[in-house]
Image: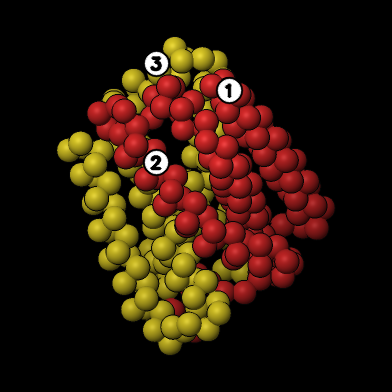
Chain colours: A yellow, B red
Amino acid sequence: MDNTRNQPAARKFLSWFNPVGRQAGGWAFILNRITALGLTFYLFLHLVVLGKLAQGPNAYDDFLALAENPLIKLGELAAVAAVILHGLNGVRIILTSFGVGVTRQRQLFYGFMAVSTVIILFFVARLYLG
Amino acid sequence: MSQSTPSTYIARPRPGETTWLWLIKIVSGPLLVLLLILHLTVNHYLGSTSSGLMTYDDVVKYYQNPIIPAIEILFLITVVTHCLIGLRGIILDLNPSRPVLRLVTWILSLLGVVSVIYGIWLALTIAAIGG
């Protein structure tokens, strides 16, 4: 039962990210929420940055050179990882929403997270080892 | 959901989220997964920079196939819609009053429409560069 339902908004918002006493479902919730908020921010930043394409090759390619900066690469990796984690966690939610694996949600969550880890490692290798 | 265990939780519309909005969010999810696989592969493996990113010339060349702007515009509409319905759902969890929720819905709708118009303009502008 959600015992945060009647809490003030600020306390409720913070309680979403409280790791104490959480089981797999609670961790899935935190993960989905953090990645959702992060990806929302990234999406609009991405749209604004892509506007440099309309300013011509110099504007865009100069910006692209920044992408080789280790900090920018780390940000890019975080965005890719968030997409993969949110996407596969979302597939799990869709499956259970339509009655698939409802009694095996913990295993589904761990399975999808294992697959996510492998794909993320693949992108780590791509970004840092070329 | 925060206190539900995996074996008892079944996703459903939140209070204040219509079934249609919830269904759009759920249906746009798998479509996004497919479009993102394409997006990540193209942008991290087909570009000519050392890390596989696309340069300006790569992007312009890529957009010469008319199916590409069409796919990118579909991707844009799907991702913006999914994102803003999801954000509204998160805000719903904070139990906003009716007037606040109405204001949030208007702001997010406006943001969505502006983003999609901007994105379509950008995609068509890039497609026209090499034309």
- Going 47% across and 57% down the picture, which residue do you hit? B33
What whole-number distance in Å separates the C-alpha atoms at marks 1 and 2? 21 Å
Residue B122 is left or right of residue B32, and the answer is right
Mark 2 is on which residue type?
A: Val
**Residue B91: % across, % down:** 64, 55
**Residues indicated by labels 2 and 3 sit on the same polypeptide chain:** no
- Going 39% across and 38% down the picture, which residue do you hit? B43
Q: Which residue is mark 3?
A: A62
Dot in front, 2 or 3: 2
Q: Residue furthest top?
A: A58
Q: Is residue A2 visible?
A: no
SS under mark 1: loop
- Going 41% across and 63% down the picture, which residue do you hit? A88
**Residue A8: % across, % down:** 63, 59
The image shows residue B88, relative to residue A39, as above or below, that is below
Q: Which residue is mark 1?
A: B131
**Residue B72: % across, % down:** 56, 41
The image shows residue B83, relative to residue B72, as above or below, that is below
Res A101 → quadrant: bottom left
Q: Which residue is mark 2?
A: B42
**Mark 1 belongs to which subunit?**
B
Res A119 → quadrant: bottom left
